[in-house]
Amino acid sequence: SLKWPNDLYCGGRKAAGILAEMASDTDGVRHVVIGVGLNVNMEEADFPPDLRGTATSLRIQSGRTFRRVDVLARLLDAFGARYAEFIGDGFSSLRDEWDRRDFLRGRRVLLRRQGGERWGTADGLDTDGALRFLPDGGPAIESVHSGEILDRP
């Protein structure tokens, strides 16, 4: 499953996170750095006590160990293919696949951003990839382009 904006879940537990940093100026984007953290061969006991039950790894999910270099090669191949789709057709080329794997859709969530925090319901993504957020008490769905989403109190 995919959790907006940057987490991957397996069996309801977090298996990976993605961090993207961008530098820009008046001429546009200068560079983007993307970091991926993927739990590959960790066992339950390898996680800190407070993450046991909420974090997972490929090994826990599959019952087997992996060669990390093989996982990296497959990850880079998949990223390259999705990136090419995105460059060619924008987010719309990925939206249906995201919708099938959306971890948050229909869940009650806490949205945190610089202006504070609010409870509401996640309602999928809009055509630009922003989170559709229906705050408790309405009145209307908001498009959220940045922030932190917590799906547990």
Image: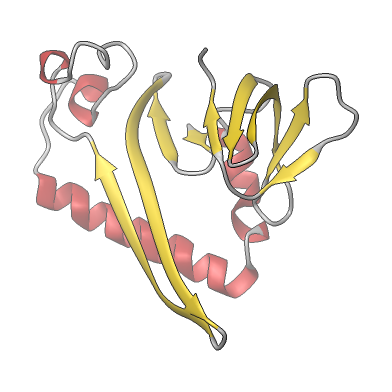
44 vs 73, nearest the viewer: 44
Residue 139's x, y, as percent? Answer: 90, 29
The residue at the point 31 percent across, 61 percent down is 77
Residue 135's x, y, as percent? Answer: 77, 26
The residue at the point 52 percent across, 43 percent down is 5
Task: Determine whether 30 is above or below 121 in the image.
Answer: below
Coloration of the structure image = secondary structure
40 vs 144, nearest the viewer: 144
Task: Determine whether 44 is above or below 31 in the image.
Answer: above
87 vs 104, nearest the viewer: 104
Task: Determine whether 127 is above or below 47 in the image.
Answer: below
Q: Which residue lies furthest to the front in this view?
A: 115
Task: Name the image quarter holding residue 123.
Answer: top right
Q: In this view, does 87 lie to the left or right of 36?
A: right
Task: Name the image quarter holding residue 108.
Answer: top right
The residue at the point 43 percent across, 67 percent down is 22
State the count of labels: 0
Residue 144's x, y, as percent? Answer: 68, 44
Q: Is residue 23 left or right of residue 67?
A: right
152 vs 93, nearest the viewer: 152
Task: Name the image quarter holding residue 23.
Answer: bottom left
Residue 59's x, y, as percent? Answer: 18, 26
Q: Residue furthest right?
A: 139
